[in-house]
Image (tube, rainbow, N blue to C red):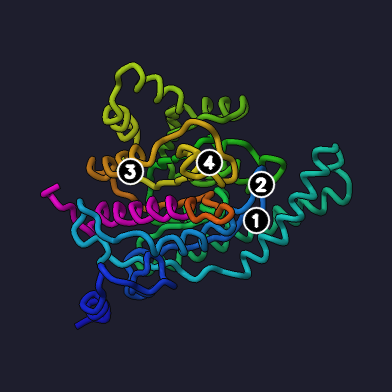
Amino acid sequence: MTKKQDILNAFDPNGLGNVDNIFALPFDEKTADLILIPVPWEVTVSYESGTAQGPQHILEASTQVDLYQKDIIDAWKMGIQMLPINQDLLTKSNKHRIMAEEYIGLLESGEENSEKGKSLLKEVNSVCAEMVEWVKSESLKQLNKHKLLGLVGGDHSTPLGAVQAIATKHESFGVLQIDAHMDFRKAYENFEYSHASISYNMLQTVPQIEKMVQVGIRDFCEEEIKFAEKQGERVSIFYDDDIKVGMFEGESWTIICDRIIKELPNEVYITFDIDGLRPELCPNTGTPVPGGISYSEIIYLLTRLVKNGKKIIGFDLNEVAPGENTDWNGNVGARILYRLCNLMGVSQGKLEWDESF
């Protein structure tokens, strides 16, 4: 009998689990099929802070998530493990966030080209590049062990290294981006790895991305529109207001989802910024925007994606931030994270649909 089988036999999914593990599951790095890499990082956030605490916040809230999924057989048995949160990375984030704020102050006063400004910018860009390389290295370690991979941020700059790592294993794939923002800014605020530049950086550094489909977009600038237009058919955008107009005029969410899914190739990476949802679901996220997608709508879209035969080759969940005296943000984030994990498992043949539902 294998160690994993021993764990499965001993664990009661209806009882209390290990509260130090994600979803209170009993697995470790060796016995879990899906590994989550936490990235406590928010150096370049441009509005509200707190996303560096996202992985810990989600971890703590995840123990309240019931493991049963009525449409997936024994979903918990796949095994999910979140690696320990790297405290050195968090310390670096906190230190360099202060530097980034100081640089932004100089930028706003027109002093960014001062010696102080140049020094701060160089330091911030350097440490962010180190973060990207660290994420890439950690991702490759797991991929080389044939683990399924997810990332938990942090701000939305964090998954670039993971996407670059996944690209070494796939000739081409699509990206489904759930977000309020395009994130097509080139070095926003002069930060090369800004959270507002993640999609730009993905397309510029990962030629294996054949198609990027953005859903929920409702806050963007002219520069981003022009960049998207230059990408031609490589980018498709489903604006939030267009989605809402369609629904107000009688178009079903099923039809809209099918149009979204049709734009994607067979293999899909999902990059999920929590601010793509309605702000009441993520009130403390870094850059909340009115409008957005409901919880039920996003679960339906992701489920339908897999039921249409798409294979999830990786994902990230970002921009979840704790609120004062509430775990609501983490609660929502943890539930989305669990569904992402299980849907990836189904798409990869690790789990099976329960056809009775």
- Start and end of the magenta stretch? 330-357
Marks 4/3: CA–CA distance? 22 Å
Q: Which is more N-terminal, label 2 or label 3? A: 2
Sort mark 2 into few (<14), some (14-19) or many (20+) by Cα contacts within 10 Å: many
Q: Position of residue 194 (x, y in %)?
A: 63, 46
Badge 4 element: helix
Q: Which is more N-terminal, label 4 or label 2? A: 2
Please name the residue that numbered disc 2 is placed on. 192
Judge whether residue 143 can be spotted in this image. Answer: no
Marks 1/2: CA–CA distance? 8 Å
- Pointers 1 and 3 in contact (CB under 8 A)? no
Badge 1 element: helix
Marks 4/1: CA–CA distance? 16 Å
The residue located at (41%, 39%) in the rendering is 210
Q: Is residue 355 magenta?
A: yes
Q: What secondary structure prevails in the magenta region? A: helix
Please name the residue that numbered disc 4 is placed on. 199
